[in-house]
Image (spheres, grey):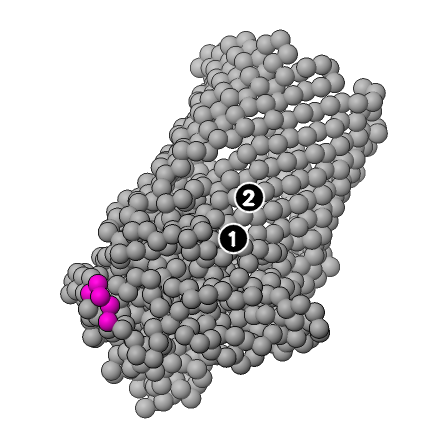
Amino acid sequence: MNLLPACYGVPNLHALEGPHSQFQNFFTLLGHYDYQFSPANHFSVRGLGTRNHTKGFTGGHGQSETSDAFGDTEEFVNQGISGVFALTTVLGRKVNEIRALIEGETRKRHPIFSGAPEIQIAPNGTFGQRFYLPGNNDNGKLQVQDNFSYTFSKHDIKFGGDVNSFVDRKDTFAGWSAGRYQFSDIASFESGSPNFYFQGFGLNGQTPFAANTLKPNYQNGLGLYWQDKWQATHRLTVTYGFRWDGTWNPQPQTRIPGQQVYTGVGPLGHGTKISPVPQHTPNDFGQWGPRIGVAWKVGSDSHPTVVRGAWGLYYAQTPTIFFPQASNGGGSKSTTLFCPTLFGCEPQDNAPYIFPSALPVTSDQLCSLATPAIGCPAIAYADPAFRNPRVSNLTVGVEHQFSNEWTVSANYAYMHSSRLKTGGFRTSNWQRNLVPVGTDQFGRAIIGSTGTTGFTCPANGVFVFEFEPLPLDCTLTPFSGALSLASFSRGNYNQFTAGVDKRFGHHYQWFANYTWSRNYSNDSSERDTDTFFGAQDPFNINIDYGRNGLDITHQFKSGVVVDLPWGFNWSSNFIAHSGLAYPAYSSVDINGDGVINQFSNNDRPVVQLGSGQPFLLPRYPARQPGFFTWDMRLQKDIKFTERAQLRLIADIFNVTNRGNLYSNPDNSGFVTVPPCTPVANSVSSSCPPLTAIPTPSNTPGYRVLDEISPGGTPFAAQFGVRFQF
């Protein structure tokens, strides 16, 4: 049967795609009002309203070139309104400011090819309803601050506090609700022979949308601070202070199934232990942040040299998308079928048909459910030691003013990040429902197997199939069965910057700076970059430490503003930097844990260069091409009255029309691992080492330049008129 004419009514893929119109419509409304109650009291309010209606959004698959058919993209309407209210009271040397922010946003996300199963035909492309659609993510935020300052003698003291409350409403993620078929090539599609099938289900007789719609989730924060700026002498200034923050995190909205999981990090019994399934996400009330800084002026007052140093501890709240909720909290209300079709678990009628999506069973009955053969539930949980990320920040620098207009500076910064996120989401999963039977020479766990016969789970009497990863908890699936959200990762950032700055004078101002930096970590990369890595090992996360996806070694920036004759103003800026770190994804599940972070295995192949010592291939062994852009603006103001003027603007982007090509690692970040040998009594494999670190020249298809770099644009010009009154 030819599926295209039979099921879709078109003769070929070109006709299926058809004509389409992609658009992005933006609307913004701003308002600002000030009122002076009295000489001591000033009130202001600022309002912002936005609306973004977009059709053709690919959800991170690239907008300039993509493998997604237009029907596989989304149409969304994001709209929101916010207001900032401030009351400032000035009483001599005492100033108090009360500030409040309130905002709300709705995010309605709709499929274009609604209700049709998503079809991927490798390597040609994808069409149908995108797997995460439809969705909804409404949210709101309330922030109230009170800041008081008092200046006296040689001190400038400030203290205050703030309350932050974020709410996520009507959150719905019903993944794969319309199903998804994957085909290895066109011939397989034409013959109706998929190699993989996905479908999301609601449990307890609910539809996937009812099961996956959350109740309102709240994340609340409270902060208090005190600081003093002390002018010890006319040459020495010391600042010191302290801040404390407390965070109340959203909690799972359903019971998380299962009997036991691993908590902690490190070898089993030496950092990692077996615990009952945590049913709670920890709050964090231990965010203590001391800060101290010194500025010392040496040399003459006319051309001073200032030496500065500062250190402090800083914290950040963890985004709520990573927390175990009803949707990803363990199958109490919903579940997903991930089906390699060689097991015969796809719908009997094949593409484009799907199973009924509301299942009349509970999560405890999934293990014994025959059709669809979903298997035991998978859970996500928060480790009891989970905390918000912390950064220890040290900066030292020197600045010299050698004229009234010219200044040179050199600065060094070191940031040590701890308690960084480990695991916690679909593209950075940390799978821990496994049993180790040893370690290899690199410290990687060798994962046990259910053997050649399988076994019957004593907890529920359900048979666990042979040749699978040996689960710690056999009431949970051994395939990504226990996904942990933890905060055991770390990072280190070093930066040196040298710059020159000319203040405005003689009709122009100018700056230039050069930065060298190095960014290393072993944390999960979800939402930080366009690459995806979770921990490769269920116990030893230190083997992932190395260059991360945000690493840029060299960066140069320069800008100039010039007042020209006849009232013209010309400005220009340059940015040049070395390429971002580029990943290498493994084509083989080397340790056999079954973890696929959306599209790839996160295991690291072994590399041996000549007769040298073998080592694990770093997560980011290569780099994107370097980036350069030069933009400029020419403008002229025409003044009609004291309060009315017209501004004419001409902008030119990428003056040199630099290509700034970029490689999408989703398409070409893969390396081929040589044929591997199974390890006895294990699902893990031993693979021959690669003989070279992959590059585009020695690895065909690796780091193919197939799109424009983020932040890049072809040569473009725009013209504008602004009337101010």
Q: What residue did someone put label 1 on?
A: 523
Q: At 50% across and 50% down in the image, what residue appears?
A: 489
Q: Which mark is residue 87?
A: none
- Quadrant of the image containing the N terminus: bottom left
Q: Are marks 1 and 2 in contact (CB under 8 Å)?
A: yes
Q: What crowding class fits label 2: few (fewer than 14 Cα within 10 Å), some (14-19), or many (20 or more)?
A: many
Three-letter residue code for mark 1: Asp
Residue 225 versus residue 52: which sits nearer the camera? 225
Horizontal and vertical percent position of residue 537 = 47, 61
Q: What residue did someone put label 2 on?
A: 417
- Quadrant of the image containing the C terminus: top right
What element does badge 2 sit on?
strand
Splitting the image into 4 quarters, where does residue 218 fall?
top left
Splitting the image into 4 quarters, where does residue 241 fall?
top right
Q: Magenta includes 458?
A: yes
Q: Which residues are magenta?
A: 456-460
Residue 459 versus residue 153: which sits nearer the camera? 459
Q: What crowding class fits label 1: few (fewer than 14 Cα within 10 Å), some (14-19), or many (20 or more)?
A: many
